[in-house]
Image: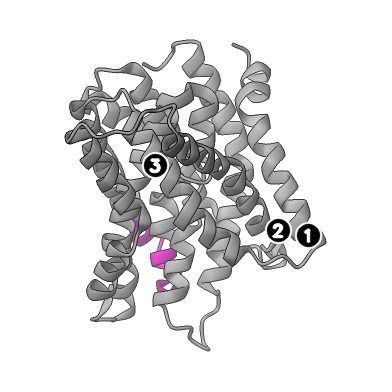
Amino acid sequence: MTLLGAFVSAILPIVAIAAVGYAIGRATDVAVGPLNTVALNFFLPALVFHGIATTTLGGDAVVSLVVAVVAYLLGLMALAFAAGHLLDVPETLFSGVVLASAFPNSGFVGIPLSAFVFGDLGRTTATVFLTVQSVVLYTLGVYVVSAREGDAAGATSALREVVRLPLVYAVAAAALVRVLGLVPPVDGTFMTTVDSVGSAAVPLMLTVVGIQLADVDLGHLRPTALPAALKLGVAPLVGVVIALAVGFTNPAVANVFVLECATPAAVTPLALVIAYRSASADEAVDVAEYMSTVIFVTTVASVVVLTGLVAAIRQGLLF
């Protein structure tokens, strides 16, 4: 498949929907917060529940995926930490660089992309990736922010956030009904309704991404070379190495894993930085503005990276 074909079939639908959200965000004063809350607490859990309850992924594949996601996140955080010290990143930006470099937008970008490229299997694999990532983010990610801020209560706050994640309960419920053999009929009223709600999550999440990007003030553009290079250049390579090391038996799962690793910087770490860091009057650079710019830059630049990666996957050049 050519680059143009990969772009039109997999990337263009995502860009088009996000562009509509961006236009809405620029033209109106719509509040993205409530939309984000609805997406994360209602539509996305429905998508996760239906995907895991009906997936053809076996237990071994799920375990391998969990191990791979954790290894990827720890590896990227370690690389970002080392690079940040080597390049003498300002202390005020350090946690932002680490989180922006390590955590991909595996949900709002990764799930739609994986669904477009691999169908139901891609969507389910991406939801498992997102779930594991969310648990790591709200534990180790919060620790990274709070530790550099000197917040001793960070660990307790992180645990509270984890138990409040609807995604965790959606995964647990789906796993339970599978183990007990109580999965409702796929064509029944309950699962049809859940599927309808979950399917709406994809366009809603992309619209939210567009609206969020519309709020970025590029007048405060800061150097983003380090996190952008790590997120879009190094991360896919790390994903390939980890996929080879884990040894996925299903090539499609391995390809989705690498695709998720290559998605742009996630939005959620920005919320953590805002929540757990106290602003200082002598900060030369506002970390929230900096991370917002990183998200914008990596999201735009990822169009090129993801197009090339999708073309390579469809030509059988990866797994």
Residues drawn in magenta: 81-96
Among numbered discs 1 and 2, the one appearing first in the sequence = 1
User: Is label 1 in contact with label 3 (beta carbons under 8 Å)?
Assistant: no
Three-letter residue code for mark 2 = Ala
Residue indicated by mark 1: 26
Q: Residue at x 55, y 31 (%)?
A: 306
Q: Residue at x 19, y 29 (%)?
A: 59
Disc 2 element:
helix
Q: Is residue 190 above or below residue 144?
A: above
Q: Nearer the viewer, mark 3 or mark 2?
A: 3
Residue indicated by mark 2: 214
Q: Nearer the viewer, mark 1 or mark 3?
A: 3
Residue 93, located in which quarter of the rendered image? bottom left
Magenta stretch encompasses residue 68: no
Residue indicated by mark 3: 48
Q: Quadrant of the N terminus?
A: top right
Q: Residue at x 27, y 62 (%)?
A: 139
Disc 3 element:
helix
Three-letter residue code for mark 3 = Val
Q: Quadrant of the C terminus?
A: top left
Q: Is residue 244 above or below residue 192?
A: above
Q: CA distance from mark 1 to mark 2?
A: 6 Å
Within 10 angstroms of label 1, few (less than 14), some, or many (20 or more) residues?
some
Three-letter residue code for mark 1 = Arg
Q: Residue at x 61, y 32 (%)?
A: 304
User: Is label 1 in contact with label 2 (beta carbons under 8 Å)?
Assistant: yes
Disc 1 element:
helix
Within 10 angstroms of label 2, few (less than 14), some, or many (20 or more) residues?
some
Residue 32, located in which quarter of the rendered image? bottom right
Among numbered discs 3 and 2, the one appearing first in the sequence = 3
